Structures are given as C-alpha cells and as structure tokens.
Amino acid sequence: PRYLGFKKAKEQVVFMYKTGAGSEIQTTILPTSKPNSFQQRIQLIGTGKLDYSPTNPETTEVKKVSDKELVVTISQDSIKQYELKIDKALAAKDVSAASGEVIFNKMACATCHSADGAKSHGPTLLGLAGSHRPIIGMKEKQLADDAYIRESILAPNKKVVEGFPPNYMPVFNLPENEVDSLLLYIKTFKNK
C-alpha cells in the first residue's frame, strides 16, 4: 500500500493508504486500558478482504470484525520486547554513523521516517540537519541542530513538527552513545 497521509477524527489519528487495486485502507490508533498497549482498527474501503499476520502472535491479538475490518491489539509485553531489540554488543561499539544506521534499522525507525524525502508517518530525515522546522504551537521555526535532533530522539513529543500527529513516536530510553550514533547517522542525509 502507498501512504496517503493522516487525519484527526474525534481526537484519534487515522492513517490512510491506497492499495494497488485502488481501495483505501484506514488505520485508527486507539488506546487500551492496559499500560503500554494500543489497538489498531484497520478498515478497508473498496473491494477486497483484509487479512493480518502478526510477527509475534503470542503478544498480538487479531479480532476479525468483518472481511473489511480488523482490530489488532499490541500488548505491553510486545512493546517491551520491541524496546529491548537492540543488540547488547552494539553498546560496546564506538560512536559512529555506521552504528547509528544499525540502531536505526533495529529500532525500525524507517517505519515512520523516510530517508529520501518520501511522505510517511513522521518527518523525513532528508535535509533535516541544519534545516528550520515548523513546530506545532510555536511562532518561529526551530533550527534542527544537534540539540534539537537529540531532544527529538529522547523526548519526541516535546516539539512536534507541523503536519505530523503528536503522541505517535514512542519514547526510547537509549544510552548516550546510541543517541550520539543516531545523531551522526541522521546528519548523513543531506539535500543534494
């Protein structure tokens, strides 16, 4: 599916995708009563049937409402496992852009942040470093210097870029050397 963008509906964020067959998939992110858990309501608008195969069936519950609607619950345990996926040997490596790339890939950052300027759930990395970013609730654009990028990694909801949903990026408690490596990696994506 091709990402179309998002909209806010009744204080919920809805992500929209276009399928190859011309139908639309809408994914609504919903809270649950459990800490560190969330639901995705996935709806198909158009022809076809929805199916979902979880990567971790032990901690992901899939409820089929109909051929065109699924509710997927990601549990606290799977989120904890996701946060702990970084290889412990990585922490011993020197701070470098290469280590940052490994962390970026292991943390699945590309799920929301493109490296080529393509539209996605979160801001692209292309041309980020040194640019001026429009921030929700701020009159002046913010310079994306090292401090801004570091803050965006550690406290992603402190300064949300206009056009993107707040409270979407999880907070990762990364060691300082991993944040430094991510920063170096992000700075490699310069506009040509």
Image (cartoon, grey):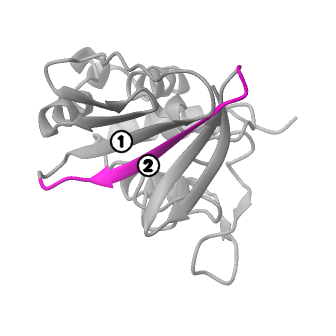
Q: Earlier in the sequence, mark 2 or mark 1?
A: 2
- Who's the residue at 46% across and 23% down the image? 50
- Who's the residue at 27% across and 21% down the image? 92
- Who's the residue at 13% across and 19% down the image? 58
In three-dimensional space, the C-alpha distance between marks 2 and 1, rounded to whole angstroms, equals 5 Å
Q: Find out whether residue 23 is within the magenta segment.
A: yes
> Residue 121 — which label?
none
Q: Which residues are magenta?
A: 21-33
- Who's the residue at 17% across and 37% down the image? 75
Quadrant assignment, res 60: top left
| Residue 121 visible in image | no
Looking at the picture, tell me which residue is in the foreground, 58 or 162.
58
Which element carries disc 1, helix, strand or loop?
strand
Q: Is residue 167 left or right of residue 164?
A: left
Toward the right, the furthest residue is 192
Q: Pointer 2 and pointer 1: residues touching (CB < 8 Å)? A: yes
The 10 Å Cα crowd at callout 1, few under 14, some 14 to 19, many 20 or more, is some
Which element carries disc 2, helix, strand or loop?
strand
Q: Which residue has dot 1 on it? A: 40
What main secondary structure does the magenta stretch of the protein show?
A: strand
Residue 12 vertical position relative to residue 35 in the rendered view, above or below: below
Amino acid carrying mark 1 in the image: Gln
Looking at the picture, tell me which residue is in the foreground, 62 or 87.
62
| Residue 107 visible in image | yes
